[in-house]
Structures are given as structure tokens and as C-alpha cells.
Image: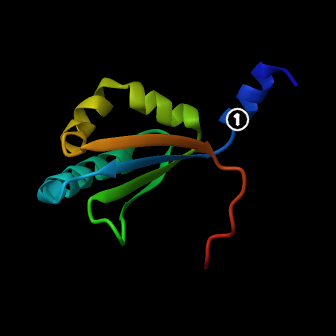
Amino acid sequence: MTAGERDERADEHRARVVFLVRVPDERTGDFLRAYEAVRHLVADGVPGHLVDQVCRSSTDPEQWLITSEWRSLADFEAWERSPEHRDLVRPMRECFTDARSLRFHIHAQTPVPA
């Protein structure tokens, strides 16, 4: 298999994007309002977006996890490069004191509970 064939097959996999961020306590309200505004716009119209979640650490109230699932990593990357993306997420990013982003191809999943 050539590198190009591997890349093409990788794009066929759904993708999970993970952001691990720190939000100071005093910015929590601003962060959640900004997330709420972004998530509905993304869910209602960004091609390839499937689902997202925002989670707060049970042991560190300033540690947050944002995850999103995409039809493909290429769909996420197209959205991330768009000027609309930068404008929409700016208010949320202004709340971060630290951020880390990870991208994964989903290779297996347990069945969704009925």
C-alpha cells in the first residue's frame, strides 16, 4: 500500500478531536456561554460534524475537555481552516489559559446502547 492509499483510507474513518483546556474559575461563565453559542451553530450546519461534548474535570474545576466527532478528519480540518471558525471560537479561546489539541481516527466502537 502506498502512502497516498494509506492517507485516502484514513480519510474514510470517522475522527475524534479532543481539546484539553484550562479555564480560570472567574471565566467559567464566559466560557460556557461561548461554547453554547458555537455548539449549536456547528451542529446545525458544519459539514461532517456528528456530535460534541464539553466535560469538566471532577478533580480540577479549571480543567475542561471538549470532544467532537466528525465524519472524517478532513471535514474537521476544512472547518478549522475557515474564517468562520476563527470568528466563532474566538470568544471561547479568549477564556483559555492553556489549550492542547489532539486528533484521532476512530478504528473501533462498541455499539450504542438502545
Residue that appears at 22% across and 36% down: 90
Residue 95 to residue 29: above or below:
above
Would you say 111 lies left or right of 38 here?
Answer: right
Element assignment for label 1: helix
Residue visible at 19% across and 40% down?
94
Q: Residue furthest left?
A: 26
Q: Position of residue 41 (x, y in %)?
A: 30, 46
Q: Nearer the viewer, residue 83 or 59?
A: 59
Q: Quadrant of residue 56?
A: bottom left
Residue found at the far right of this picture: 1
Front residue (pair 3, 99):
99
* Rendered location of residue 53, percent (x, y): 40, 59
For the view shown, which residue lies furthest in the front direction?
59
Relative image position of residue 48 (x, y in whole percent) = 51, 41
**Residue drawn 27% across the image and 47% down it:** 38
Q: Which residue corresponds to mark 1?
A: 10
Q: Quadrant of the N terminus?
A: top right
Q: Is residue 114 above or below residue 110?
A: below
Q: In the image, what residue occupies the spot 23% across and 31% down?
A: 87
Report the residue that reaches farthest toward the bottom: 114
